[in-house]
Image (tube, rainbow, N blue to C red):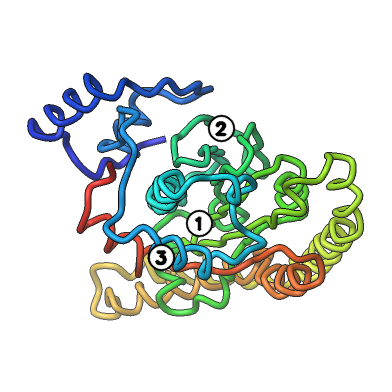
Amino acid sequence: MRLISIATKGVRYLAKQSKDIAKFGQKRIARQGVTDQMLDTLTPFRRLSTKPTTLSDPKYFIQKFETETGEKFLPLNWANLSEAEKVDFIVKDRYSKLVSHKIMGNIKNEKAEHFYSLDSEGNIVFYKKGNQTHCSGEVPIDGSTIHNHPGFQREHMDLDAIESVQKHKPELLGSIAHGGEDIKSAFVSGERRSYVVDAMDNRFLLEVPIDIRAAKPLEKLSASVEPMGYINKGDNVTLFAFNKIRPEKDAKVYEIFEKGKKYQQLKGTPEYSKEEMSKIILDFNCAKADALPNFTWREEMLNALAEQIGFRFKKIKGLDVYNILLNKMKIS
């Protein structure tokens, strides 16, 4: 996996870190599977010292955070935190969101699933690479997980083809949000947020309420049995339908492929044009996308389940919001 860096550490930044470490001490964070390259690339300006963060108007920002977050989705020990500790959490919570989007931007194009865990302060504490359909790992209480869904799209189409279809007929590609195992894992692990990004850069956030995070594992599992069966049933129905219609759609893909081969033979003659060849390639890519399973129905199902069970699910815009923030500030 190629990691895309967002910044190079400056002399002033390093000098300030050194002073803060000397005064407040250095963080000691237990990590598993996380390399120095990952940390330096994904969080180049991470805070290495234990210096607490501050805000200009603590009471205002605390009230704002509580209102926007909602009582059911606050950290488990929120009521026991001091004002200073709440402020520190709020700043680090925003940092955690930024890191999560940075990670999603790095893994969205991968052919295999990649799984990251963040603790409640946004520190990357776990990483694991899986296969094309599955990857799981450890997550701290009140932490976040981030993983990608390559899907059939990334398995059978290259990135140029996906981008082309997205531009002209995005409905053929659809989206791949959380699956049944993703929700079950979130309920059992005690995580606060679960992010998923697919190969089309659709980004999804599932937030787990306090009552599920605080429950005993068996109770969490019991609460998740019915909806999990519902989602898995939906998966099977979709795949069964896909297997029934695939021959017809495969035939269309083959037909356009043969048309392209014949047209390519005209290259160098007056009958050949780049525009027509580009159209045939687009038609081919669209036909291929149409022949692959479309899991967009998961969004509607997850919205219904979220209301039924009490978790929160939504599609989020990473590029429109968080990349702007990343360009304007250094993660510290």
- Disc 1/disc 3 C-alpha distance (Å): 10 Å
The label shown at residue 199 is 1
Q: Where residue 172 sits in the image (x, y, percent)?
A: 57, 74
Identify the residue at horizontal 89%, vertical 57% (top origin).
229
The N terminus sits in image quarter: top left
Q: Secondary structure at mark 1?
A: loop
- Which tag, 1 or 2, sits closer to the chain's start? 2
Q: Where residue 306 sits in the image (x, y, percent)?
A: 73, 68
Q: Which quarter of the picture shows residue 56?
A: bottom left
Q: Where residue 13 sits in the image (x, y, percent)?
A: 14, 34
Q: Which quarter of the picture shows residue 80?
A: top right
**On screen, 158 above or below 296?**
above
- Disc 1/disc 2 C-alpha distance (Å): 16 Å
**On screen, 273 above or below 1?**
below
Q: Secondary structure at mark 3?
A: helix
| Residue on which disc 2 sits | 129
Q: Is residue 3 visible?
A: yes
Q: The residue under label 2 is which amino acid type?
A: Lys
Could you tell whether 18 is left or right of 236 in the image? left
- Disc 2/disc 3 C-alpha distance (Å): 24 Å
Q: Are marks 2 and 3 in contact (CB under 8 Å)?
A: no
Could you tell whether 157 is left or right of 76 in the image? left
| Residue on which disc 3 sits | 163
Identify the residue at horizontal 46%, vertical 23% (top origin).
29
Q: Are marks 1 and 2 in contact (CB under 8 Å)?
A: no
Q: Which quarter of the picture shows residue 40?
A: top left
Front residue (pair 304, 58): 58
Q: Are marks 1 and 3 in contact (CB under 8 Å)?
A: no
The C terminus sits in image quarter: top left
Identify the residue at horizontal 29%, vertical 78% (top origin).
275
Residue placed farthest to the left in the image? 11
